Amino acid sequence: MIIERLVYICLMSVYNQRGVSAQKEEVHNAIKNLDAGLYKNAFCKLYEDKLGGSSDYINLMHADGAGTKSVLAYLYWKETGDVSVWKGIAEDAIAMNLDDLLCVGIYDNICFSSTIDRNKMLITGEVIETIITATQSYFNRLQPYGIRIHYMGGETADVGDVVRTIAVNGTMAARWPKNKLITNNNIKAGNVILGLASFGKAVYEDAFNSGIGSNGLTSARHDVLFEKYRNFPETYSPEIDQSVVYLGKNSITGTVKMDNETHTIQSLVLSPTRTFAPLMKVLLEKYFNDIDGLIHCSGGGQTKCLKYIDRPLKIIKDNLFNPPPVFKLIQQNSGADDREMYQVFNMGHRMEIYTNEAAAHRMIEEAAAFNIEARIVGRVEGASKKELVIERSGNTIVF
């Protein structure tokens, strides 16, 4: 236990040296005095219907983005000249927003505005065009599944004095009836937790998805990629000590053998973040009354659920998916223990549904129709305090 704690402290030190935080403590402290919205446990802030003036509706405006995953795309583009890699970054910025909205029950008639900041000296107009075109193409792909997202334009700024390469973000807005909201207030003892796999190839995806998502990639790329990428100083802050920059063994264009299969590094770390919108639309329409809570396991990984529960409940996750190869690659290169990995990455499922066991089994069948693996990964029990217990390979991790 003492050794595990020392490893954890060392890893946190490396995180801090790289200028990142898995839990974003300073951000949460900065916003602690802001209005929490109508439902404090809801995954997104929900406000009175300022646009329509109806007491039966809420308004939502939510922002998110691809994060530092764009740096990985930049490195791959610089090495290969393949501009198509930026399509995935456009999808990341959308999925990170959209799947947050899914967690409050919103899946249709959404407005989207993109925000792209670039260093014009390094990021070409072709890259910008690829991202914008890919954004509309992604919306077109979702529309046959009943997911209507309206592209309302946005802001593209040349801010080379502020942004070293490129930042790809977006904002989603919606007006939604209160009687169709998921607020997480109903999560209770007796719930089972249904996890939707972040990996595989869903029927609406073009290629196999590694499951990586868009979180934890600052440290992941420094732990996985090797030191030649120090020759791209624009991809990391000059304030970072060289001792924690690009320490891995891999090239972004290389390959690695994991679980007896050969994977390209690019396909593992640059898989677009999966959206669960087509499946979740079906689940929210058919099983709304059976869904007590929804959590998007993004920043904070498998500990994200603790942020949205304010009651003394014990969350037990003891039947998790085996981590996909990308997370094994990151762990092998970084030396991170399981506690750190499950606190940063989704580790195999990025959406979890708090429901009853009978409904969970029906939802598993619905997921299979979309070629998305689903399983009951845990349960909720009564307790004297709020805590999360992860059981993995004979080890017990308590948060």
Image: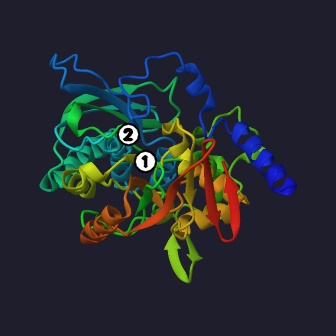
The quadrant holding residue 332 is: bottom right
Mark positioned earlier in the residue sequence (1 or 2): 2
The quadrant holding residue 135 is: top left
Q: Check if mark 1's residue and mark 2's residue have beta carbons within 8 Å.
A: no
Q: Which residue is mark 1?
A: 296
In percent of the image, x 59 and y 45: which residue is there? 218
In percent of the image, x 31 and y 45: which residue is there? 102
Inspect the image, locate mark 2, and give the three-letter code of the amino acid beneath it. Answer: Thr
Q: Position of residue 207 (x, y in %)?
A: 33, 67
* Drawn side of residue 113 relative to residue 177, left or right: right
* Drawn side of residue 106 relative to residue 63, left or right: left
Mark 1 → mark 2, Cα distance in angstroms? 33 Å
Q: Position of residue 349 (x, y in %)?
A: 46, 60
Q: Which residue is mark 2?
A: 124
Mark linked to residue 38:
none
User: Depth check: 28 or 208 in front?
Assistant: 28
Q: Position of residue 39 (x, y in %)?
A: 38, 28
Q: Quadrant of the N terminus?
A: bottom right
Residue 69 appears in the rendering: yes
